[in-house]
């Protein structure tokens, strides 16, 4: 049985498995955190402009179509191999969905509500904090959720540029024609992606202001 | 008091200025209605008052202070702002919406809670029922009641209202016009009210400023504008039925005279307006109506001749 053999591999190499899993999670989490830190403020700032926004969003949309593997391949000649280049590539991968969703969500906030906020005397910062961000949050979070799943599955490919993680088992599994080892990488990576999607879905619901939630 | 002096605003790319040398004074406690066709600059003028838009030249003075010298955010917290689309914050409860400006001004929370209930009652909404509701659960009329409560929350001396009743059905609109005008007069607010509806302007304005192409065409009490339009544009704007509109501003009691004997004519209420009285005369084919006074007092009579005299007479300044 394939799964039993894979499980035996994990039991035989607990440290290797734990390290790979840890690296995978750390790499993904760091990339996602970086991407959020960059793309959310950038998306809010872009929503206030027009020409810069069109340019940035067009670039993000192009970025979205570049396959994960291509991003990693493009990064390697410049930054070399290891954790840092993998982190860089994955952050790049996570930026477009968060940026596009944040920008769209803030743009979609009812202009009359924003006008009223200005008219009653909210400062620009107060309008963002009290009105635009809370109303945009569900859609922003949907972008983060998409990015998170992309990053976790993309992180599998990090092994190709020496980034470590569960992808290591898959690449060696393929190289050695060792199917159980491949499964040791593939199944946990898949479960991690599904689990993250569920977790962020729940978070998205919690963060949606109560009257705006779908019934 | 609001003093607008030689105000000019030209939007980039526009052929002519939106507001072109406007000079206007609104007395304290008065309702000034800005009216005119689309694009006449009425909304722009209103938005220049609280610096939502900055003028190219000219000044706006509020109670002796040039608004250009006041920080816009601080300025707006002391000017009520009501727009047609209301713009309630959908993620906040009704109570939180009403509390917006007091919270921005960092009032004490117990004071805010009391103020929320006071205002909701003022605009005719039961606090216990509506405090914790959300905007999406309210009808259009209720939303605008909350919108007005939000604007009144910090007790600003001046209220800016941009077609606040424009999106409501006629029955709700008339009811809210009457209710809010009573409230605003009682609170002695100075109001700048934008509309394109001449009937609304006549109904609620102490003075009406008729605008065209960014300039002021006529600025006067409704009675005076209906009696003597400044030019053909104003005459066309107020409508061919301006004599009837004038009659609607006067009540039966103003034109009725004591009757020697109890007339056999059909009755009309003393508080009805003269337009309705005229309509009743036409419908019944009579030229006099009996006006019953309070119980015990002798009835008076309203004649067609009295209405006709009233329609052609020079305006009487009605002190509201």
Image: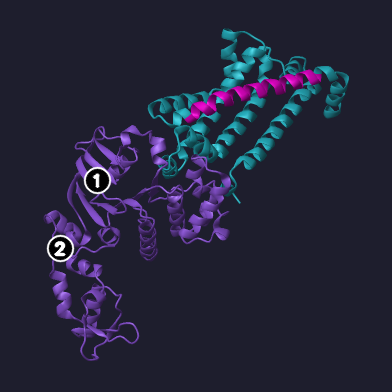
Say above or below: A135 vs A48.
Answer: below
> What residue does disc 1 label?
B39
In the figure, residue A113 lies in which quadrant?
top left
> Residue visible at 24% across and 69% down?
B248
Which numbered dot is residue B227?
2
Q: Pointer 2 indicates a residue of which chain?
A: B
Where in the figure is residue A93, as x and y percent of width and height?
58, 23
Label 1: few (<14), some or many (≥20) within 10 Å? some
Say above or below: A185 vs B90.
Answer: above
Chain letter, cyan in picture: A
Q: Nearer the viewer, residue A187 or A99?
A: A99
> Residue visible at 58% across and 59% down?
B128
> Residue visible at 13% across and 74% down?
B309
Earlier along the polypeptide chain: callout 1 or callout 2?
Answer: 1
Question: Horizontally, is A59 left or right of A69 in the view?
Answer: left
Q: Pointer 1 indicates a residue of which chain?
A: B
Q: Which colour represents chain B?
A: purple
The residues colored magenta run A17-44
Quadrant of image for the N terminus of chain A: top right
Where in the figure is residue B112, as x and y percent of width and height?
54, 48
């Amino acid at each position: 049985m394939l799964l039993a053999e894979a499980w035996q591999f994990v039991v035989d190499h607990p440290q290797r498995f734990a390290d790979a899993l840890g690296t995978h999670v750390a790499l993904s989490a760091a990339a996602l955190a970086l991407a959020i830190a960059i793309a959310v403020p950038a998306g809010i700032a872009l929503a206030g402009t027009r020409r810069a926004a069109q340019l940035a969003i067009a670039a993000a949309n192009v970025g979205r179509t570049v396959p994960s593997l291509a991003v990693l391949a493009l990064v390697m000649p410049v930054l070399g191999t290891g954790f840092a280049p993998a982190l860089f590539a994955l952050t790049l991968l996570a930026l477009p969905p968060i940026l596009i969703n944040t920008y769209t969500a803030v743009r979609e906030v009812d202009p009359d509500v924003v006008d009223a906020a200005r008219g009653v005397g909210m400062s620009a910062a107060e309008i963002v904090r009290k009105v635009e961000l809370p109303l945009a949050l569900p859609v922003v979070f949907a972008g983060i959720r998409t990015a998170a799943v992309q990053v976790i599955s993309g992180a599998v490919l990090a092994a190709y540029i020496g980034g470590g993680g569960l992808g290591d088992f898959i690449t060696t599994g393929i190289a050695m024609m060792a199917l159980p080892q491949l499964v040791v990488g593939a199944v946990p990576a898949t479960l991690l992606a599904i689990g993250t999607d569920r977790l962020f879905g729940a978070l998205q619901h919690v963060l949606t202001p109560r009257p705006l939630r779908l019934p | 008091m609001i003093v607008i002096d030689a105000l000019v605003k030209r939007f980039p790319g526009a052929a002519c200025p939106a507001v072109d040398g406007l000079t206007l004074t609104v007395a304290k406690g008065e309702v000034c209605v800005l009216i005119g066709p689309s694009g006449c600059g009425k909304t722009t003028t209103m938005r220049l008052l609280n610096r939502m838009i900055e003028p190219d030249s000219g000044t706006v003075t509020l109670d002796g202070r040039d608004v250009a010298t006041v920080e816009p955010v601080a300025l707006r917290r002391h000017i009520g702002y009501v727009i047609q689309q209301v713009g309630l914050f959908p993620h906040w409860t009704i109570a939180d919406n009403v509390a917006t400006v007091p919270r921005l001004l960092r009032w004490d929370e117990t004071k805010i809670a009391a103020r929320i209930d006071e205002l909701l009652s003022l605009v005719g909404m039961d606090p216990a029922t509506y405090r914790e509701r959300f905007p999406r659960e309210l009808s259009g009329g209720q939303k605008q009641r909350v919108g007005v409560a939000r604007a009144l929350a910090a007790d600003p001396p001046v209220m800016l209202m941009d077609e606040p009743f424009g999106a409501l059905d006629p029955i709700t609109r008339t009811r809210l016009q009457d209710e809010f005008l009573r409230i605003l007069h009682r609170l002695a607010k100075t109001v700048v009210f934008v509309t394109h509806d001449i009937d609304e302007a006549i109904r609620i304005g102490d003075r009406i400023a008729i605008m065209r192409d960014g300039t002021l065409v006529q600025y006067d009490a409704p009675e005076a504008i209906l009696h003597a339009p400044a030019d053909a544009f104003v005459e066309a704007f107020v409508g061919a039925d301006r004599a009837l509109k004038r009659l609607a501003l006067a009540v039966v009691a103003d034109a009725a005279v004591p009757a020697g004997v109890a007339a056999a004519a059909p009755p009309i209420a003393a508080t009805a307006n003269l337009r309705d009285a005229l309509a009743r005369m036409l419908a019944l084919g009579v030229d006099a109506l009996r006006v019953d006074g309070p119980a015990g007092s002798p009835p008076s009579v309203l004649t067609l001749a009295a209405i006709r005299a009233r329609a052609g007479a020079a305006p009487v300044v009605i002190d509201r």
